[in-house]
Image (cartoon, rainbow, N blue to C red):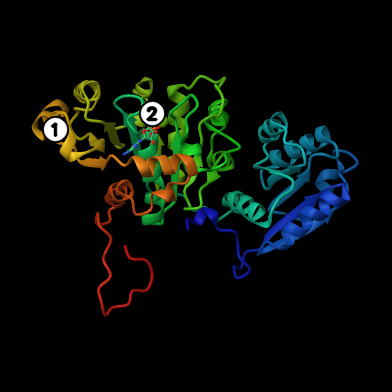
Amino acid sequence: MPGFLEVPSAHDARVLSVALIGPDEPRRKTIASVLAECPGVETRVFSSYPADADELPRMLEEHHDVVIVDLDGDPKLAIDMVESICDDGSRTVMVFSEQDDRELVVRCMRAGAREFLALPITVADMADALARVSVRLPGASPARRKAGSLFVFLGAKGGCGVTTLASNFAVLLAQESGEKTLLIDLGLPLGDVAINLGVIAKFSTDNAFQDPSRIDANFLSSLLATHPSGLFVLAAPGDFPPTRVTVDAVDKLLAVARQNFDYVVVDAGSRLDLKGSALFDISATIYLVTQVGISELRNSNRLISQYFATKGRKLQIVLNRFISHAMPFGEEDITKALTRPAQWRIPEDFASARRTRNTATPLALQGSPILIAIRKMARKACGLPENRARKRKGFSFFGRAR
Ligand SMILES: Nc1ncnc2c1ncn2[C@@H]1O[C@H](COP(=O)(O)OP(=O)(O)O)[C@@H](O)[C@H]1O
Ligand SMILES: [Mg+2]
């Protein structure tokens, strides 16, 4: 599992010190009992808000890594407290509430809170939230030496299979490499990566793009959802987003993402409007997803010759829904249209694709022809042999076969 998810465990020398401020006894007890079940956490409980602004520094005199504040007792005072604790910069703030009020969530995030915990909350939810905020603790996240690799999936035409391929590729890349992997859905508006993966995302790229100057490692981590594979996901907005996506905003998001993740995968849909952005930087690997049809091949030809013919450009062509015995064109014609041979062929696999859509779990592809083909792509991308090592009789293997 990537280090990003690790909560300091009981065995670590570092204990996470938490201050819990909650004037309402039942809510406070709920949070305190969930915290008590999280390993490596030491909690100091405050049963009232400070009487005034001067009292807050005195109250939090002792150092705490994380301060958790009840919003519902007095939302305005609570948000003022969040702002003042965050201004100091030495502590991470989380808030909790029984209300599922989006406006309140956004106000808290703007004030600097890193996590919004909606009650009721499970121990697993709390452990995940603490894991996410713990990246901002001193020494928790050593500076990266090298920018993470960027893999961009772009469609020759809408409906070519970009989302299906990008989301399964990202899951498999996270699983096969065991490295920190982020999937960003830029297939705006109404991208459907989160739906495809069955993850519930509270935040989206829209929250990042509202104020690009605020995007840093901590803010980005607070916007992410997690998939059981260990993959982190920055979803697209679930509604028509009010914010216009600028090249500068995309550049900032990708820069922060690549500083903090080993692998960044982007579902770019058919967004050629972002052509001038870091999405199409020469260091990025572009997976051009197309199908064997007249208009798809014609679009691919234009895209390749106009945008991706530069020397040194890492372009991989993916023929999706490929059925070798039933193609309207022969291999030679396809290569001629694409100006070069395609690197990858993903078979038409209607049953698995439908199962994925209905169950919203990419793992439903397990063992399917699509999965086998995409796993090869993911393994190659992280420098592993395309095929997994096969177990040989008479040998026992410990650990993961890579
Ligand atoms: N290899 C495949 N075999 C069968 N169906 C596929 C395959 N790839 C994608 N699909 C289906 O095609 C449709 C469009 O795919 P999607 O990934 O949403 O495309 P895009 O993101 O490019 O618009 C979806 O219904 C998806 O399930
Ligand atoms: Mg899509």
Specify whether residue 147 is in view: no
Q: Nearer the viewer, residue 397 or 8?
A: 397
Q: Residue at x 44, y 28 (%)?
A: 250
Residue 160's place in the image compared with 173, above or below, is above
Q: Quadrant location of the C terminus?
A: bottom left
The disc labelled 1 sits on which kind of residue? Arg
Give residue 74's quadrant in the image: top right
Secondary structure under tag 2 reads loop
255 over 148 or under it: above or below: above
Relative image position of residue 361 (x, y in whole percent): 47, 46
The alpha-carbon separation of the residues under discs 2 and 1 comes to: 22 Å
Q: Residue at x 36, y 33 (%)?
A: 162
Q: Callout 1: helix, strand or loop?
A: loop
Percent x, y of residue 364: 43, 49
Residue at 81% x, 46% y is 57
Q: Would the CB of label 2 be found within 8 Å of ligand 2?
A: yes
Given residues 65 and 241, the one toward you in this image is 241
Return the disc, 2 or 1, that comes first in the chain's sequence: 2
Q: Position of residue 346 (x, y in %)?
A: 26, 41
Residue at 70% over, 31% down: 107
Q: How many marks?
A: 2
Q: Amino acid at mark 2?
A: Gly
**Horizontal relation, residue 228 to residue 339: left or right:** right
Relative depth, front residue between 346 and 166: 346
32 to 115, vertically: above or below? below
Label 2 crowd bin: few (<14), some (14–19), many (20+), radius 10 Å = many
Residue tagged by mark 1? 340
Kindly give the residue lying farthest to the left in the view shown: 332
Given the current orientation, which residue lies at the most extreme right position? 51
Which percent across, then down, holds residue 321?
27, 36
**Residue that badge 2 annotates:** 269
